[in-house]
Amino acid sequence: MSSNVIGAGILGMGSALPERVLTNSDLEKMVDTSDEWIIKRTGISERRILDKGEPVFQLGVKAAERAISDAGIASEDIDLIIAATTSPDYVFPQMSCMIQSKIGAKKAAAFDMNVACSGFVYAMSVAKQFIASGTYKYILIIGCEGLSKLTDWEDRNTCVLFGDGAGAAVMGPVENGYGVLSTYLGADGEMGNVLTLPFCCFTQADLDVRPNKNKNVIWMDGGEVFKFAVKIMEQASLRAIEDANLKVEDIDFVFPHQANIRIIDGALKRLGFTHEKMHLVIQKYGNISSASIPVAMDEALREGKIKKGDNIVLVGFGGGLTWASAVIKWSK
Ligand code: ACO
Protein backbone atom coordinates (compact mmCIF):
# COMPACT_ATOMS: atom_id res chain seq x y z
CA MET A 1 0.00 0.00 0.00
CA SER A 2 1.56 3.35 -1.00
CA SER A 3 2.08 5.84 1.83
CA ASN A 4 -0.54 8.36 0.60
CA VAL A 5 -3.35 5.76 0.49
CA ILE A 6 -5.19 5.36 3.79
CA GLY A 7 -6.03 1.81 4.90
CA ALA A 8 -9.80 1.28 5.31
CA GLY A 9 -11.34 -1.30 7.60
CA ILE A 10 -14.26 -2.13 9.85
CA LEU A 11 -14.28 -0.32 13.21
CA GLY A 12 -17.57 -1.66 14.59
CA MET A 13 -20.50 -3.91 13.68
CA GLY A 14 -24.12 -4.45 14.70
CA SER A 15 -27.17 -6.41 13.57
CA ALA A 16 -30.92 -6.63 14.17
CA LEU A 17 -33.58 -9.24 13.43
CA PRO A 18 -37.36 -9.09 13.81
CA GLU A 19 -38.85 -10.81 16.87
CA ARG A 20 -41.35 -12.93 14.95
CA VAL A 21 -40.20 -16.45 14.01
CA LEU A 22 -41.75 -18.31 11.06
CA THR A 23 -40.89 -22.00 11.20
CA ASN A 24 -41.01 -24.65 8.50
CA SER A 25 -44.01 -26.19 10.22
CA ASP A 26 -45.79 -22.81 10.00
CA LEU A 27 -45.11 -22.89 6.25
CA GLU A 28 -46.51 -26.43 6.00
CA LYS A 29 -49.87 -24.88 6.90
CA MET A 30 -49.56 -22.20 4.19
CA VAL A 31 -48.28 -24.07 1.09
CA ASP A 32 -47.71 -27.65 -0.07
CA THR A 33 -44.29 -28.18 1.50
CA SER A 34 -42.62 -30.05 4.36
CA ASP A 35 -40.03 -29.35 7.03
CA GLU A 36 -38.02 -32.27 5.65
CA TRP A 37 -37.98 -30.90 2.05
CA ILE A 38 -36.98 -27.40 3.13
CA ILE A 39 -34.15 -28.55 5.41
CA LYS A 40 -32.81 -31.08 2.91
CA ARG A 41 -32.96 -28.79 -0.15
CA THR A 42 -31.98 -25.47 1.50
CA GLY A 43 -30.68 -25.94 5.07
CA ILE A 44 -33.32 -23.53 6.43
CA SER A 45 -35.36 -24.40 9.57
CA GLU A 46 -36.88 -21.02 10.37
CA ARG A 47 -36.68 -17.35 9.47
CA ARG A 48 -37.47 -13.98 11.13
CA ILE A 49 -40.34 -11.97 9.65
CA LEU A 50 -41.46 -8.38 10.19
CA ASP A 51 -45.06 -7.87 11.26
CA LYS A 52 -47.39 -6.24 8.75
CA GLY A 53 -47.09 -2.66 10.00
CA GLU A 54 -43.41 -2.89 11.00
CA PRO A 55 -41.16 -0.85 8.68
CA VAL A 56 -37.98 -2.37 7.25
CA PHE A 57 -35.72 0.64 7.96
CA GLN A 58 -36.19 0.27 11.74
CA LEU A 59 -34.04 -2.86 11.57
CA GLY A 60 -31.36 -0.76 9.88
CA VAL A 61 -31.61 1.87 12.62
CA LYS A 62 -31.05 -0.74 15.36
CA ALA A 63 -28.14 -2.38 13.51
CA ALA A 64 -26.58 1.05 12.83
CA GLU A 65 -26.87 2.16 16.46
CA ARG A 66 -25.13 -1.02 17.60
CA ALA A 67 -22.35 -0.65 15.00
CA ILE A 68 -21.74 3.00 15.98
CA SER A 69 -21.55 2.10 19.67
CA ASP A 70 -19.21 -0.84 18.88
CA ALA A 71 -16.96 1.52 16.88
CA GLY A 72 -16.81 3.93 19.83
CA ILE A 73 -17.74 6.99 17.76
CA ALA A 74 -20.77 9.31 17.79
CA SER A 75 -23.47 9.45 15.10
CA GLU A 76 -22.44 13.04 14.45
CA ASP A 77 -18.99 11.80 13.36
CA ILE A 78 -20.36 9.87 10.37
CA ASP A 79 -19.57 11.40 6.98
CA LEU A 80 -21.55 9.09 4.70
CA ILE A 81 -24.27 6.44 4.98
CA ILE A 82 -24.74 3.79 2.30
CA ALA A 83 -27.82 1.57 2.68
CA ALA A 84 -27.62 -1.57 0.56
CA THR A 85 -31.21 -2.70 0.11
CA THR A 86 -33.49 -4.33 -2.40
CA SER A 87 -36.58 -3.91 -0.22
CA PRO A 88 -36.78 -0.25 0.93
CA ASP A 89 -39.98 0.99 2.56
CA TYR A 90 -40.00 3.92 0.12
CA VAL A 91 -38.23 4.64 -3.15
CA PHE A 92 -37.80 8.09 -1.61
CA PRO A 93 -37.11 9.17 1.00
CA GLN A 94 -34.33 6.65 0.65
CA MET A 95 -33.69 4.15 3.44
CA SER A 96 -30.26 5.74 4.05
CA CYS A 97 -31.94 9.13 4.66
CA MET A 98 -34.56 7.61 6.97
CA ILE A 99 -31.78 5.98 8.99
CA GLN A 100 -29.72 9.20 8.98
CA SER A 101 -32.64 11.10 10.50
CA LYS A 102 -33.35 8.49 13.22
CA ILE A 103 -29.74 8.11 14.37
CA GLY A 104 -29.02 11.87 14.18
CA ALA A 105 -26.08 11.60 11.79
CA LYS A 106 -26.61 15.22 10.83
CA LYS A 107 -23.48 15.84 8.76
CA ALA A 108 -23.66 12.57 6.79
CA ALA A 109 -24.37 12.39 3.08
CA ALA A 110 -26.61 9.40 2.31
CA PHE A 111 -27.60 7.19 -0.57
CA ASP A 112 -29.13 3.77 -1.24
CA MET A 113 -27.57 1.07 -3.34
CA ASN A 114 -29.56 -1.76 -4.87
CA VAL A 115 -27.29 -4.64 -5.81
CA ALA A 116 -29.60 -7.29 -4.31
CA CYS A 117 -27.73 -9.85 -2.21
CA SER A 118 -24.32 -8.54 -3.36
CA GLY A 119 -25.14 -5.12 -1.88
CA PHE A 120 -23.16 -5.17 1.36
CA VAL A 121 -19.86 -6.05 -0.32
CA TYR A 122 -20.51 -3.50 -3.11
CA ALA A 123 -21.15 -0.85 -0.41
CA MET A 124 -17.94 -1.82 1.37
CA SER A 125 -16.00 -1.43 -1.86
CA VAL A 126 -17.39 2.09 -2.44
CA ALA A 127 -16.77 3.09 1.19
CA LYS A 128 -13.19 1.87 0.95
CA GLN A 129 -12.48 4.24 -1.99
CA PHE A 130 -13.78 7.29 -0.12
CA ILE A 131 -11.71 6.46 2.98
CA ALA A 132 -8.57 5.52 1.04
CA SER A 133 -8.66 8.83 -0.86
CA GLY A 134 -9.12 10.82 2.35
CA THR A 135 -12.51 12.19 1.19
CA TYR A 136 -14.37 10.78 4.21
CA LYS A 137 -13.25 9.38 7.56
CA TYR A 138 -16.23 7.44 8.94
CA ILE A 139 -18.74 5.66 6.70
CA LEU A 140 -21.73 3.64 7.88
CA ILE A 141 -22.70 0.80 5.54
CA ILE A 142 -25.89 -1.15 6.16
CA GLY A 143 -27.46 -4.21 4.56
CA CYS A 144 -31.14 -3.94 5.45
CA GLU A 145 -33.91 -6.13 4.04
CA GLY A 146 -37.58 -6.97 4.49
CA LEU A 147 -37.96 -9.60 1.79
CA SER A 148 -41.05 -11.01 3.50
CA LYS A 149 -42.87 -7.96 2.12
CA LEU A 150 -41.90 -8.90 -1.45
CA THR A 151 -42.56 -12.63 -1.17
CA ASP A 152 -45.43 -14.46 -2.83
CA TRP A 153 -46.72 -16.43 0.16
CA GLU A 154 -48.63 -18.75 -2.19
CA ASP A 155 -45.52 -19.76 -4.19
CA ARG A 156 -43.75 -22.65 -2.46
CA ASN A 157 -40.78 -22.29 -4.81
CA THR A 158 -39.79 -18.99 -3.20
CA CYS A 159 -41.69 -18.37 0.05
CA VAL A 160 -39.67 -20.92 2.04
CA LEU A 161 -36.38 -19.20 1.24
CA PHE A 162 -36.44 -15.61 2.49
CA GLY A 163 -36.34 -13.72 5.78
CA ASP A 164 -35.84 -10.19 7.12
CA GLY A 165 -32.86 -8.63 8.92
CA ALA A 166 -30.18 -5.94 8.97
CA GLY A 167 -26.44 -5.80 9.55
CA ALA A 168 -24.27 -2.68 9.72
CA ALA A 169 -20.59 -1.74 9.82
CA VAL A 170 -18.78 1.50 10.60
CA MET A 171 -15.79 1.77 8.30
CA GLY A 172 -12.85 4.08 8.85
CA PRO A 173 -9.06 4.41 8.74
CA VAL A 174 -7.01 1.47 10.08
CA GLU A 175 -3.33 0.64 10.54
CA ASN A 176 -1.42 0.16 7.28
CA GLY A 177 -1.54 -3.44 6.04
CA TYR A 178 -4.89 -4.09 7.77
CA GLY A 179 -8.49 -3.62 6.65
CA VAL A 180 -9.87 -4.22 3.16
CA LEU A 181 -7.02 -5.71 1.09
CA SER A 182 -9.00 -6.33 -2.11
CA THR A 183 -12.48 -6.13 -3.60
CA TYR A 184 -13.82 -7.68 -6.77
CA LEU A 185 -17.21 -6.67 -8.22
CA GLY A 186 -19.06 -8.05 -11.22
CA ALA A 187 -22.37 -8.20 -13.08
CA ASP A 188 -23.98 -10.16 -15.91
CA GLY A 189 -27.13 -8.32 -17.01
CA GLU A 190 -27.71 -10.92 -19.73
CA MET A 191 -28.77 -13.33 -16.98
CA GLY A 192 -31.01 -10.81 -15.21
CA ASN A 193 -34.23 -12.57 -16.23
CA VAL A 194 -33.60 -15.62 -14.00
CA LEU A 195 -34.28 -13.62 -10.82
CA THR A 196 -36.76 -10.75 -11.06
CA LEU A 197 -38.82 -8.35 -8.99
CA PRO A 198 -40.81 -5.94 -11.21
CA PHE A 199 -41.62 -2.54 -9.79
CA CYS A 200 -43.36 -0.10 -12.17
CA CYS A 201 -43.76 -2.27 -15.23
CA PHE A 202 -44.40 -5.93 -15.98
CA THR A 203 -43.22 -7.50 -19.23
CA GLN A 204 -45.19 -10.36 -20.81
CA ALA A 205 -42.39 -12.68 -19.61
CA ASP A 206 -43.01 -11.55 -16.00
CA LEU A 207 -46.75 -12.19 -16.34
CA ASP A 208 -46.12 -15.61 -17.89
CA VAL A 209 -43.90 -16.97 -15.13
CA ARG A 210 -45.55 -15.58 -11.98
CA PRO A 211 -48.21 -17.84 -10.50
CA ASN A 212 -49.94 -14.70 -9.24
CA LYS A 213 -49.43 -12.70 -12.43
CA ASN A 214 -48.82 -9.01 -11.75
CA LYS A 215 -48.00 -9.06 -8.06
CA ASN A 216 -44.79 -7.22 -7.11
CA VAL A 217 -43.11 -10.34 -5.78
CA ILE A 218 -39.80 -12.13 -6.18
CA TRP A 219 -39.68 -14.78 -8.89
CA MET A 220 -36.74 -16.92 -9.87
CA ASP A 221 -35.61 -19.83 -11.94
CA GLY A 222 -34.07 -21.54 -8.89
CA GLY A 223 -32.02 -24.06 -10.86
CA GLU A 224 -30.37 -21.39 -13.04
CA VAL A 225 -29.61 -19.17 -10.03
CA PHE A 226 -28.19 -22.19 -8.23
CA LYS A 227 -25.79 -23.12 -11.07
CA PHE A 228 -24.64 -19.50 -11.47
CA ALA A 229 -24.13 -19.06 -7.73
CA VAL A 230 -21.97 -22.17 -7.28
CA LYS A 231 -19.71 -21.16 -10.16
CA ILE A 232 -19.37 -17.47 -9.30
CA MET A 233 -18.84 -17.88 -5.55
CA GLU A 234 -15.79 -20.05 -6.18
CA GLN A 235 -14.40 -17.80 -8.95
CA ALA A 236 -15.01 -14.55 -7.06
CA SER A 237 -13.41 -15.90 -3.86
CA LEU A 238 -10.29 -16.95 -5.75
CA ARG A 239 -10.07 -13.59 -7.55
CA ALA A 240 -10.24 -11.54 -4.33
CA ILE A 241 -7.69 -13.81 -2.63
CA GLU A 242 -5.31 -13.47 -5.58
CA ASP A 243 -5.77 -9.67 -5.71
CA ALA A 244 -4.87 -9.53 -2.01
CA ASN A 245 -1.63 -11.39 -2.81
CA LEU A 246 -2.71 -14.29 -0.61
CA LYS A 247 -3.26 -18.01 -1.11
CA VAL A 248 -6.33 -20.05 -0.23
CA GLU A 249 -4.34 -21.58 2.67
CA ASP A 250 -3.85 -18.09 4.15
CA ILE A 251 -7.61 -17.59 4.67
CA ASP A 252 -8.83 -18.01 8.27
CA PHE A 253 -12.55 -17.35 7.89
CA VAL A 254 -15.16 -17.01 5.13
CA PHE A 255 -18.48 -15.17 5.10
CA PRO A 256 -20.46 -16.32 2.05
CA HIS A 257 -23.88 -14.98 1.14
CA GLN A 258 -26.24 -17.54 2.68
CA ALA A 259 -29.02 -18.40 0.20
CA ASN A 260 -28.90 -22.20 0.30
CA ILE A 261 -26.52 -24.45 2.24
CA ARG A 262 -26.04 -26.59 -0.87
CA ILE A 263 -24.77 -23.54 -2.80
CA ILE A 264 -22.26 -22.77 -0.03
CA ASP A 265 -21.05 -26.35 0.07
CA GLY A 266 -20.95 -26.72 -3.72
CA ALA A 267 -18.96 -23.52 -4.17
CA LEU A 268 -16.62 -23.41 -1.22
CA LYS A 269 -15.82 -26.92 0.02
CA ARG A 270 -13.57 -27.42 -3.00
CA LEU A 271 -11.46 -24.50 -1.75
CA GLY A 272 -11.13 -26.21 1.63
CA PHE A 273 -13.57 -23.75 3.22
CA THR A 274 -15.45 -26.13 5.49
CA HIS A 275 -18.21 -25.13 7.93
CA GLU A 276 -15.56 -24.71 10.68
CA LYS A 277 -14.29 -21.67 8.75
CA MET A 278 -17.77 -20.11 8.53
CA HIS A 279 -20.47 -18.78 10.81
CA LEU A 280 -23.72 -20.16 9.43
CA VAL A 281 -27.01 -18.37 10.15
CA ILE A 282 -29.09 -19.64 7.22
CA GLN A 283 -30.72 -22.34 9.38
CA LYS A 284 -32.31 -19.72 11.65
CA TYR A 285 -32.67 -16.64 9.38
CA GLY A 286 -33.08 -17.98 5.79
CA ASN A 287 -31.85 -15.81 2.92
CA ILE A 288 -31.74 -12.21 4.17
CA SER A 289 -30.15 -10.85 1.00
CA SER A 290 -27.76 -7.93 1.58
CA ALA A 291 -28.01 -8.43 5.36
CA SER A 292 -26.79 -12.02 5.28
CA ILE A 293 -23.03 -11.33 5.33
CA PRO A 294 -22.99 -8.53 7.98
CA VAL A 295 -25.43 -10.36 10.28
CA ALA A 296 -23.20 -13.47 10.20
CA MET A 297 -20.07 -11.31 10.72
CA ASP A 298 -21.57 -9.50 13.70
CA GLU A 299 -22.57 -12.78 15.38
CA ALA A 300 -19.18 -14.37 14.70
CA LEU A 301 -17.40 -11.36 16.19
CA ARG A 302 -19.56 -11.40 19.29
CA GLU A 303 -18.78 -15.11 19.72
CA GLY A 304 -15.03 -14.35 19.52
CA LYS A 305 -14.48 -16.31 16.32
CA ILE A 306 -12.42 -13.56 14.63
CA LYS A 307 -9.14 -12.14 15.96
CA LYS A 308 -6.77 -9.38 14.92
CA GLY A 309 -4.72 -10.35 11.86
CA ASP A 310 -7.17 -12.95 10.55
CA ASN A 311 -7.60 -12.98 6.77
CA ILE A 312 -11.31 -13.03 5.97
CA VAL A 313 -13.13 -13.57 2.67
CA LEU A 314 -16.58 -12.09 2.01
CA VAL A 315 -18.36 -13.39 -1.10
CA GLY A 316 -21.87 -12.79 -2.37
CA PHE A 317 -24.08 -13.09 -5.45
CA GLY A 318 -27.56 -11.86 -6.24
CA GLY A 319 -30.14 -10.35 -8.57
CA GLY A 320 -28.86 -8.50 -11.61
CA LEU A 321 -27.18 -10.93 -11.76
CA THR A 322 -24.32 -9.56 -9.70
CA TRP A 323 -21.47 -10.77 -7.52
CA ALA A 324 -18.92 -9.28 -5.15
CA SER A 325 -16.03 -10.49 -3.02
CA ALA A 326 -13.49 -8.96 -0.68
CA VAL A 327 -10.56 -9.91 1.51
CA ILE A 328 -10.13 -8.16 4.86
CA LYS A 329 -7.22 -8.44 7.29
CA TRP A 330 -9.04 -7.96 10.59
CA SER A 331 -7.75 -4.91 12.41
CA LYS A 332 -9.38 -4.96 15.87
N1 ACO B 1 -41.62 -27.76 -0.93
C1 ACO B 1 -41.76 -28.93 -1.57
N2 ACO B 1 -41.45 -29.10 -2.85
C2 ACO B 1 -40.95 -28.05 -3.52
C3 ACO B 1 -40.75 -26.81 -2.92
C4 ACO B 1 -41.11 -26.68 -1.57
N3 ACO B 1 -40.97 -25.53 -0.90
N4 ACO B 1 -40.23 -25.96 -3.83
C5 ACO B 1 -40.09 -26.64 -4.97
N5 ACO B 1 -40.54 -27.91 -4.79
C6 ACO B 1 -40.61 -28.99 -5.76
C7 ACO B 1 -40.62 -28.50 -7.17
O1 ACO B 1 -41.94 -28.14 -7.55
C8 ACO B 1 -40.12 -29.70 -7.93
O2 ACO B 1 -41.17 -30.61 -8.07
P1 ACO B 1 -41.34 -31.46 -9.45
O3 ACO B 1 -40.10 -32.28 -9.51
O4 ACO B 1 -42.58 -32.23 -9.19
O5 ACO B 1 -41.43 -30.45 -10.52
C9 ACO B 1 -39.12 -30.33 -6.94
O6 ACO B 1 -39.42 -29.77 -5.67
C10 ACO B 1 -37.67 -30.00 -7.26
O7 ACO B 1 -37.59 -28.62 -7.56
P2 ACO B 1 -36.23 -27.95 -7.88
O8 ACO B 1 -36.46 -26.52 -8.25
O9 ACO B 1 -35.45 -28.81 -8.84
O10 ACO B 1 -35.51 -28.02 -6.46
P3 ACO B 1 -34.05 -27.64 -6.13
O11 ACO B 1 -33.39 -28.77 -5.50
O12 ACO B 1 -33.35 -26.96 -7.28
O13 ACO B 1 -34.25 -26.52 -5.00
C11 ACO B 1 -34.22 -24.15 -4.71
C12 ACO B 1 -34.96 -25.33 -5.31
C13 ACO B 1 -34.13 -24.32 -3.22
C14 ACO B 1 -35.00 -22.87 -5.04
C15 ACO B 1 -32.79 -24.08 -5.31
O14 ACO B 1 -32.86 -24.17 -6.70
C16 ACO B 1 -32.06 -22.81 -4.94
O15 ACO B 1 -31.67 -22.62 -3.80
N6 ACO B 1 -31.80 -21.95 -5.93
C17 ACO B 1 -31.07 -20.70 -5.68
C18 ACO B 1 -31.90 -19.77 -4.89
C19 ACO B 1 -31.16 -18.50 -4.63
O16 ACO B 1 -30.01 -18.50 -4.29
N7 ACO B 1 -31.81 -17.39 -4.85
C20 ACO B 1 -31.18 -16.15 -4.63
C21 ACO B 1 -32.19 -15.14 -4.44
S1 ACO B 1 -31.36 -13.78 -3.91
C22 ACO B 1 -32.11 -12.34 -4.21
O17 ACO B 1 -31.49 -11.54 -4.86
C23 ACO B 1 -33.44 -12.04 -3.62
Image: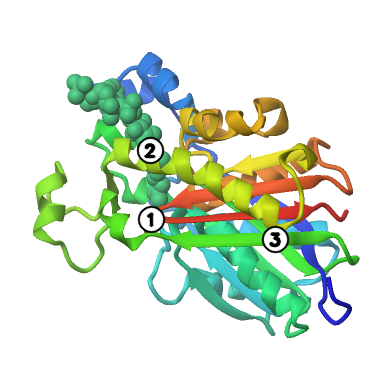
Seen from the viewer's position, the closer of residues 105 and 291 is: 291
Q: Amino acid at mark 2?
A: Lys
Residue at 18% x, 67% y: name it.
Answer: 201
Residue 163 in sight here: no
- Mark 1 sits on what residue? 321
Q: Is residue 137 left or right of residue 260?
A: right
Q: Amino acid at mark 1?
A: Leu
N-terminal-most mark, 2 or 3: 3
User: Within 10 Å of the Cα at label 3, are there few (<14), some (14-19), or many (20+) other Cα atoms?
Assistant: many
- Dot 2 falls on a residue whose secondary structure is helix
The structure's colour scheme is rainbow
N-terminal-most mark, 1 or 3: 3
Q: Is residue 90 left or right of residue 58?
A: left
Is there CB contact under 8 Å for labels 2 and 1? no
Q: Quadrant of residue 40?
A: top left
Tell me if the residue at label 1 has its CB under 8 Å from ligand 1.
Answer: no
N-terminal-most mark, 2 or 1: 2
User: Within 10 Å of the Cα at label 2, are there few (<14), some (14-19), or many (20+) other Cα atoms?
Assistant: few
Residue at 71% x, 26% y: name it.
Answer: 276
The relative height of residue 164 versus residue 174 in the rendered view (above or below) is: above
Residue at 54% x, 71% y: name it.
Answer: 96
Residue 244 in sight here: yes
Circle number at residue 182: 3
- Mark 2 sits on what residue? 227
Is there CB contact under 8 Å for labels 2 and 3? no
